[in-house]
Amino acid sequence: MKSMNVRKTLSLSILIIVATVPCVPAAFSADELTFKQVAKASKTYFRDSAEFPLRISVEMTATDLSRRVRKHKTGKFKYDFHGYNQRSGNATGMLYGPKGMFKAARGIAISSLAPMALLSLDVEKDYTFTLAEPVEPGLLSARLAPIPDCPTFQWLADAYGPKSLCGSFQIQMQADDLALKHLVFDAVGLPVAANIDFLGPATLSSYHVEAEFQKVFLPGDPKPFLVPKLIVVTVETDKGKLVITSNYAPRK
C-alpha cells in the first residue's frame, strides 16, 4: 500500500488514550471532553499501531438496485502499519494477501488513516467540535464537521475509496478511560460520477464508514493496545451499492 496524504480527515480519532492512562480514578463527564484530548489520543494511536501487526479478514459484496448480488469475494491479509510522518502528512503501511481482493483491502486500510487530520496544528480551524448526548451510560459522544467546504469527492478506482477523507464524524468513547468505542464517518463533496467495479459508470451518492474498536495485549506487556475490531465501508450509487466488511485480529 502506498503512502497517502489525508490532511483533511478525522476518522479513527482518539484511539489510544488508555495506553497512556491505563487507570483513571473517576469517569469523565460529557462536558469535560475536549478537542485536544481527542487529538492527543489520535497521536498515541498511530504510535502504538506502528508496533502492532494485524490480520484482516475482508469480505466484499456488490449488489444492484434489485439487490441481486453482482459480485461476492473474500480474502485474508497481513497488515503492517509503518507509522505517520507529521511533517509530510503521510502514513505508510503494507498489505500482504490475494491480488483479487487487494483493492477492497486497500480501501479499508485508507479508511483507518483518517485520524491524521487531528495531528494538524490548524485542525480546530478546519472542524467544529460539538458534544452530543451519550447513546448509553458510560459513553461520551461528540460530532465533528468540516468548517470550510470539502473538495469534490474523488473515487480511487484502484482502492475502492476516496482520494482524501473529508467529511463529518460521530465518535463514541468510554467515559472511564477515553478509549474509542465506535466511529461513524460520512464523506462530503458528493454526489459525483464514478466508475465502480461490478456496477459500472454510476453516480456515487454516499461513502459511509462505521468502525468498532478493541483492546488487545501482547504477551508479557500489561499495556493494552486499542486497534480496529470491525470496519464496514458502504458505497451507495444509483446503480447499486458496494459493501466492504473487515474483521481485525492480532497477528502472532
Image: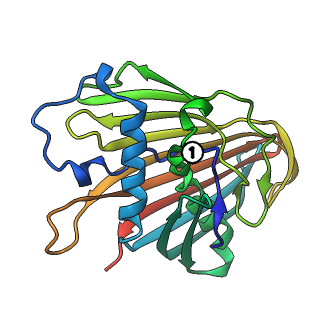
Q: Which of 197/159 is in front? A: 159
Q: Residue at x 73, y 54 (%)?
A: 163
| The image quarter in which residue 71 lies | bottom right
Q: Residue at x 49, y 53 (%)?
A: 231
Q: Which of 144/77 is in front? A: 144
**Left or right: 185 with respect to 147?**
left
Q: x, y percentage for residue 23?
A: 13, 46
Q: Which of 140/245 is in front? A: 140
Q: x, y percentage for residue 102?
A: 65, 73
Q: x, y percentage for residue 14?
A: 39, 44
Query: Around disc 1, counting alpha carbons within 10 Å, would you say few (fewer than 14), some (14 to 19), or many (20 or more)?
Result: many
**Left or right: 99 with respect to 174?**
right
Look at label 1 and name its amino acid. Val
Q: Which residue is mark 1?
A: 209
**Left or right: 114 with respect to 176?**
right
Q: Which of 100/125 is in front? A: 125
The answer, for residue 71, to whether it is visible in the render is yes
98 lies above or below 27: below
The answer, for residue 14, to whether it is visible in the render is no
221 lies above or below 118: below
For the C terminus, the quadrant is: bottom left
| The image quarter in which residue 47 lies | bottom left
**Left or right: 244 with respect to 49?**
right
